[in-house]
Image (cartoon, rainbow, N blue to C red):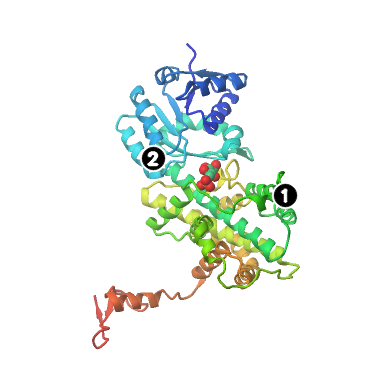
């Protein structure tokens, strides 16, 4: 009987395209879906792309896999993933591998990995980015799990991943939940990138007075420079699109309420737990949230404020480009900080430079910029922040005046720019000699005897605020 090198169960669009990608690369792939019609349709439509071994039951599916078995599950994150694991794990043997290619929460992945490890089964939580096109033509792949499982899986995954300069956009991220953690932060950065682009559009429209088609041209131009990226490219496409039904710009007929599936929110929740400031990502999540509160917005519509008007600055678009680039540097610096903090917390030993390398192609945030980040980590693998890398520090210095001007203009004319503003505040916080946190400490000590440290002596101190205000050591 012919055996498959790998199997995919869950043949919705992502699973189907991943299976096709494997088959197209010459890997015989077993395919299975809870409803057999999908399996049948896949083989009927795309059977000539490679060797597919369709199976109509979990037992037949597992039996068709060579050993150690490599089984990829592509189902909805959450309870459906647990249900599929419960269904397949009893059919597997020690040494076999279950790859979860969904957007699982890394804590779930850690739990599943630990449970399956007890049974000798490798559980490989794997971030896959690039949407349905990426799954078919080459995604960015972020596998976690054991080093041993990567030996058996890595070559296949690297084969089907996107390539940049011949380097696959896939590497072993680290043990247990590391892959899904990094994918989560990827999505958080994706939110931030999208929010900064949205603010740029809003400012070009309402401060510079450009029409959507003109803004599309601005983004097209930006996409030939240092901002070159998939998200900038598709932004130009979306802005240039006209609604067939009304003849209006597409962007004017879409309801302005952004939705989310939750990975951006997880990035922020996790950052709060780890104590990592990710204001850029948080503002991006909150901006979607604000947009969705229709009742709140409706009730507030008549609040006073300046009427939006053009600023009449011929160079404004260039200033926005600088503000966007500077804020983007901040967003990525924050995301990488979170990866480093997660890595330290969970003992994952994640190589930040390698993450930048595998995000250069295939994924939603793919960008020329990521090669700069790769180079920054190559120059100094233990840098505490990307902001101080020579290239980025210079770009931030160069963007200064424009960045501040854009944030000030937005505030003056009443265009919300929370992403730009928080990025600038983070930048200024880091570079400040003294922060008002000293005052915060004084207040905490006043009302709660929470103590403070001094700049001139070691130890913890408390001032007797309710008494003679002498200072005591605590
Ligand atoms: C990717 C994307 C993808 C994500 C969508 C939708 O890397 O391919 O990040 O995984 O699910 O972009 O995300 P939201 O619905 O939360 O915007």
Which quarter of the figure is the C terminus placed in? bottom left
The answer to whether the residue labelled 2 contacts the one labelled 1, judged by CB atoms less than 8 Å apart, is: no
Q: Does dot 1 land on a helix, a strand or a loop? A: helix
Q: Quadrant of residue 66?
A: top left
Seen in the image, is 227 located left or right of residue 283? right
> Residue 295, image x and y in percent?
50, 59
Q: At which x and y percent is residue 76?
A: 45, 36
Q: Is 457 placed left or right of 188 in the picture?
A: left
Give the mark count. 2
Point 42% across, 19% down: residue = 57
Q: Is residue 390 at least partly visible in the picture? A: no
- Residue topped by disc 1: 240
Mark 2 near ligand 1 (CB under 8 Å)? no
Residue wearing tag 2 = 109
Q: Is residue 271 left or right of residue 245?
A: left
Q: Between disc 2 and disc 1, whose residue precedes?
A: 2
Q: Name the outermost residue toward the top.
A: 1
Residue at image x 53%, y 61%?
297
Residue 238 in sight in this render: yes
């Amino acid at each position: 009987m012919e055996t498959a090198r790998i199997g995919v169960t869950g043949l919705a669009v992502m699973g189907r395209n991943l299976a096709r990608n494997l088959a197209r690369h010459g890997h015989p792939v077993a395919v299975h879906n809870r409803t057999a019609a999908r399996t049948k349709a896949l083989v009927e439509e795309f059977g000539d792309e490679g060797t597919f071994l369709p199976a109509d039951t979990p037992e037949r599916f597992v039996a068709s896999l060579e050993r150690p078995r490599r089984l990829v599950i592509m189902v909805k994150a959450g309870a459906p993933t647990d249900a599929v694991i419960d269904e397949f794990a009893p059919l597997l043997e020690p040494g076999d591998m279950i790859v979860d290619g969904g957007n699982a929460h890394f804590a779930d992945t850690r739990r599943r990995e630990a449970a399956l490890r007890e049974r000798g089964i490798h559980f490989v939580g794997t971030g896959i980015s690039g949407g349905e096109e990426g799954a078919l033509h080459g995604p960015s792949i972020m596998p976690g799990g054991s080093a041993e499982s990567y030996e058996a899986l890595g070559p296949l995954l690297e084969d089907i991943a996107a390539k940049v300069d011949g380097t696959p956009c896939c590497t072993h991220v680290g043990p247990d939940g590391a892959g899904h953690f990094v994918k989560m932060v990827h999505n958080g950065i994706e939110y931030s990138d999208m929010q900064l682009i949205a603010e740029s559009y809003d400012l070009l429209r309402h401060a510079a007075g450009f029409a959507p088609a003109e803004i599309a041209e601005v983004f097209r131009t930006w996409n030939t420079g240092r901002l070159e990226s998939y998200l900038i490219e598709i932004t130009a496409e979306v802005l240039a699109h006209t609604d067939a039904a009304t003849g209006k710009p597409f962007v004017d007929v879409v309801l302005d309420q952004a939705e989310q599936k939750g990975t951006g929110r997880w990035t922020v929740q996790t950052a709060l737990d780890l104590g990592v400031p990710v204001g850029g990502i948080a503002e991006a999540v909150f901006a979607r949230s604000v947009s969705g509160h229709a009742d709140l917005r409706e009730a507030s519509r008549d609040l006073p404020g300046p009427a939006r008007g053009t600023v009449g600055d011929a160079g404004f678009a260039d200033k926005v480009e600088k503000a966007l680039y500077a804020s983007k540097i901040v967003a990525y610096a924050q995301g990488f900080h979170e990866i480093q903090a997660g890595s330290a917390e969970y003992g994952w030993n994640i190589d930040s430079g390698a993450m930048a390398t595998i995000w250069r192609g295939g994924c939603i945030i793919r960008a020329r910029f990521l090669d700069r980040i790769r180079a920054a980590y190559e120059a100094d693998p233990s840098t505490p922040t990307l902001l101080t890398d020579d290239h980025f520090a210079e770009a931030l210095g160069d963007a200064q005046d424009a960045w501040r001007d854009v944030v000030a203009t937005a505030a003056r004319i009443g265009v919300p720019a929370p992403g730009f503003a928080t990025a600038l505040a983070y930048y200024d916080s880091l570079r400040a000699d003294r922060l008002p946190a000293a005052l915060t400490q004084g207040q905490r000590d006043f009302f709660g005897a929470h103590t403070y440290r001094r700049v001139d002596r070691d130890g913890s101190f408390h001032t007797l605020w309710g008494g003679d205000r002498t200072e005591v050591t605590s």
